[in-house]
Each structure stands twice: as structure tokens, then as C-alpha cells.
Amino acid sequence: DSGVTQTPKHLITATGQRVTLRCSPRSGDLSVYWYQQSLDQGLQFLIQYYNGEERAKGNILERFSAQQFPDLHSELNLSSLELGDSALYFCASSPKGGYGYTFGSGTRLTVV
Amino acid sequence: GNSVTQMEGPVTLSEEAFLTINCTYTATGYPSLFWYVQYPGEGLQLLLKATKADDKGSNKGFEATYRKETTSFHLEKGSVQVSDSAVYFCALFPFSGGSNYKLTFGKGTLLTVNP
């Protein structure tokens, strides 16, 4: 157990639907990062939150949004889902200062 | 911007063979460098790291040396095992940090070790 918890582990949904992925960071870590892993694009950075505030944005689609709550857990919301959104979504956390990532085991999203 | 280029896979080896996976990077300043490993069905785990030039990271028989002159961080293992079959990612963490704390990853190299 890495200390970063992601739920659910697997998710199957239809095109056009909306889903929410959840991440609980390792105890004491203030930063949360979301990554998308697909076969053709590799590991793509989506977004980072630090202590509740958005800190950096990567290749995140407008249909996707995220937030970090006061208890530091984070949610990634994916809407108007398309077949191409099928991927593994990873959350990682790190302490203040950003060094020392710990990854969760991921959520596998399948859009049918 | 920062980028990481690692050798294309897949790489298939026999048990006890020597492994090299090449990784080069582009970055300003003095980034920290990492190798992560992803076993089938699992998340990414940190394998080893190096934070400054000429540092050698090592773990589980794997080694990589931070070469600033060639901007490289090649992963090596003298004798691979079947259990080393996984996807290996080279990654870079910017020196400056600031508001941009994200790791930049290479595309990953799939290693398969046959008995």
C-alpha cells in the first residue's frame, strides 16, 4: 500500500456520461497530481493542486475538472465522456515542496 | 520546456541477460532524475533517483548515473529476472520547482524477460 488511495479501481460507463474519480493523498502530503495513461499518449500530466489551490495545469480537456477539498482529498470530474477518454487515471501526492511523488494504483476507466 | 526521451520498446530479454534502457532529457538548470517501474495492473513505483550530476541511483540491482555532459540517465541491470518484466519510465523533476512541481515522464519502455 503506497498510502495514496484511489477509488474506484474500475469504472465502465457509456459515452456522454459523467464520472468522478476520487483520490486520498498520503498522510501529510499537500500536493495532489492527476495523470492520464493511455496506450497512444503515454503518461500525460493533467493538473496539480496544492493545499486546495490549483497550482499547475497540463493537457487537461475542458470537459475535465478537478478540485481539492479542505481534508486534502481530490476529485477528478470527467464529463461528456468519449471513447477516447478510456484510460488509466493516476493520482499522486507529494509533501510540501513537491519532491517525492507517491502514486496510487489508478482508476481504469472504460467508456463504451 | 522540459522533456524526456527514452528508448522505444518493447525490449525482450532472456533471464540473466544484461539490460540497458536509454534515457536522455532536456531541461534548464539541474533537474532531479528518476526511474519508475509499473508492474502489470499496478501503479507506478519509484525505482531509483539521482539529484545531481554524477550521482548514481541504485535499487534492486538496477543502477543509473546522472550524466550532465550527455544529459542522460540510462538504466542498467547486470542480470535480469522474470520478475523484472514491467514498464519502465524515466522522469524529470525541475530544479526550480516554483509553482511547477510536476514530474515529466518519458513514454515508457516495456521489458519482457523470458525464462
Image (spheres, coloured by chain):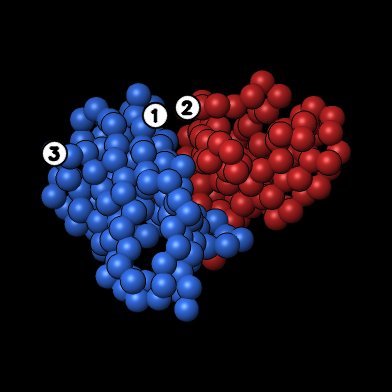
Chain colours: A red, B blue
Dot 2 falls on a residue whose secondary structure is strand
Q: Earlier in the sequence, mark 3 or mark 1?
A: 3
Q: Tell me which corner region of the image, top left, top right, bottom left or bottom right, holds residue A34.
A: top right
Identify the mark at residue B100; answer none if there is no mark. 1
Question: On the rendered structure, is B99 left or right of A21?
Answer: left
Judging depth in this view, the residue of B12 and A103 nearest the camera is B12
For image coordinates 31% across by 58% down, the residue present is B20
Q: Is residue B71 visible?
A: yes
Height in image: A66 above or below B63?
Answer: above
Residue of label 3: B69
On screen, A4 above or below A51? below
Q: Residue flagged by tag 1: what amino acid is it?
A: Asn
Quarter of the picture containing the N terminus of chain A is bottom right
Give how far across and how far down residue A102 sits, in percent. 46, 53
Write the residue at 17% across / 45% down. B67
Task: Please say if B96 is above or below B20.
Answer: above
Q: Chain of mark 2?
A: A
Residue B99: % across, % down: 38, 27
Q: A71 or A15: which is nearer to us?
A: A15
User: What is the x, y in percent for residue A95?
Assistant: 40, 46
Quarter of the image that includes the C terminus of chain A: top right
Marks 1 & 2 on one chain: no
